[in-house]
Image (spheres, rainbow, N blue to C red):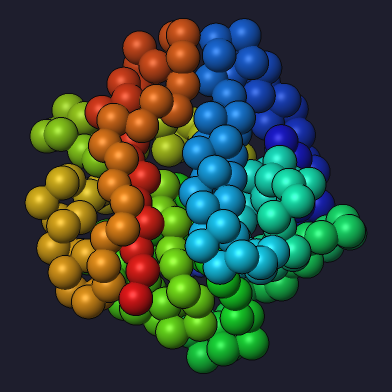
C-alpha cells in the first residue's frame, strides 16, 4: 500500500512489509471492509437511502476503495492529515485541519478504522462528540490491550504497520473498561458492540489474537 508521494523514498520498506503481510495472511483490509460495509448497509436499510460516509483518518483510503462500489454508497469523503490527491468516482479526499472545519463534512455515517488510539484514547470522547455533531452514526474499529505485554505487542505491531508513514505510535490503548467510560462520556448510545473481532487468520492472528480487536457503532 503506497500512501502519499512524500513516502516515495520508503517504497522498498512498504513493499517488504506488504509482502510479509501477504505471505502470512496479514491482510486486514478484506475482513474490516466486509464488516464495516455490512454495518453501513444496515444504516442504509434503516434510512432507506444511499449513504454518504466520512472516512476519518482514512490513510490511503484502502477501506473506502473496497466499499465504494457497493450500491448503498452515495459518496465517501476521506479526511487525514496528509496532502493527498485521489481521483475516484465516489471518493473525495481532503486534508484535515482541525475540529472547526469538520462542519464542512456532513455525512450519514463516520468510519474510524484504527484511528482513535493514534489520536489519544483519553481524548477520544471529544473527537467522537465532535464527529457526532455532523453525522448520525459512528462506526469504530479499534484495539483492546490486555495488560503490559499486550500493550507492548500492540505498540510493536503499530510500529511495524505505520513506520514507513510517519504515524505516531500510541503509549496506550483502550481496554474494555476505558472504552465503556469513553462511550458514557460521549453521551451517545452504543448500538452495536463486537468484541474479539477476527481481523486476521494465519500467522498474524497467532501474533495479534482477535481479543485485540473490537468494533462498535455509536448513535445519537
Ligand atoms: C493505522 S492508520 C489507519 C488508516 C485507515 N483508517 C485504515 O484503516 O487503513 C491511522 C491513520 O490515522 C490518521 N490520524 C492520526 N492522527 C490523526 C488526526 N489527529 N486527525 C486525522 N487523522 C489522524 C493517520 O494519519 C493514519 O492515516
Q: Residue at x 64, y 16 (%)?
A: 22
In the depicted structure, whether residue 151 falls above or below residue 102: above
Q: Residue at x 60, y 74 (%)?
A: 107
* Quadrant in the rendering for residue 89: bottom right
The percent position of residue 82, horizontal first and vertical second, equals: 67, 64
In the depicted structure, whether residue 203 falls above or below residue 44: above
**Frontmost residue, 176 versus 119:** 176
Residue 57 left/right relative to 7 = left
In the depicted structure, whether residue 48 falls above or below residue 130: above
Residue 189 left/right relative to 49 = left
Q: Residue at x 51, y 62 (%)?
A: 46
Q: Residue at x 32, y 51 (%)?
A: 192
Q: Is there any visible trace of residue 3 in the rendered image?
A: no
Look at the image and tell me in which quarter the C terminus lies.
bottom left
The percent position of residue 64, horizontal first and vertical second, equals: 68, 50
* Quadrant in the rendering for residue 217: bottom left
In the depicted structure, whether residue 218 falls above or below residue 100: above
Amino acid at each position: 500500500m503506497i500512501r502519499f508521494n512524500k513516502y516515495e523514498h520508503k517504497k522498498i520498506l512498504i513493499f517488504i512489509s506488504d509482502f510479509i503481510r501477504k505471505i502470512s495472511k496479514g491482510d486486514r483490509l478484506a475482513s474490516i471492509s466486509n464488516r464495516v460495509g455490512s454495518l453501513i448497509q444496515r444504516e442504509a436499510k434503516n434510512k432507506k437511502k444511499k449513504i454518504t460516509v466520512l472516512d476519518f483518518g482514512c490513510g490511503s483510503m484502502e477501506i473506502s476503495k473496497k466499499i465504494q462500489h457497493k450500491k448503498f454508497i452515495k459518496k465517501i469523503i476521506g479526511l487525514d492529515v496528509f496532502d493527498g490527491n485521489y481521483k475516484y468516482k465516489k471518493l473525495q479526499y481532503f486534508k484535515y485541519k482541525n475540529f472547526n472545519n469538520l462542519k464542512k463534512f456532513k455525512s450519514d455515517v463516520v468510519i474510524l478504522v484504527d484511528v482513535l488510539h493514534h489520536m489519544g484514547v483519553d481524548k477520544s470522547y471529544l473527537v467522537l462528540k465532535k464527529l457526532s455533531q455532523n453525522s448520525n452514526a459512528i462506526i469504530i474499529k479499534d484495539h483492546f490491550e490486555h495488560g503490559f505485554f499486550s500493550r507492548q505487542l500492540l505498540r510493536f505491531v503499530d510500529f511495524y504497520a505505520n513506520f514507513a508513514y510517519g504515524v505516531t505510535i500510541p503509549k496506550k490503548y483502550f481496554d474494555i473498561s476505558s472504552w465503556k467510560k469513553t462511550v458514557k462520556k460521549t453521551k451517545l448510545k452504543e448500538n452495536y458492540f463486537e468484541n474479539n473481532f477476527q481481523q486476521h487468520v494465519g500467522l498474524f492472528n497467532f501474533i495479534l489474537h482477535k481479543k485485540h480487536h473490537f468494533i462498535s457503532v455509536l448513535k445519537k
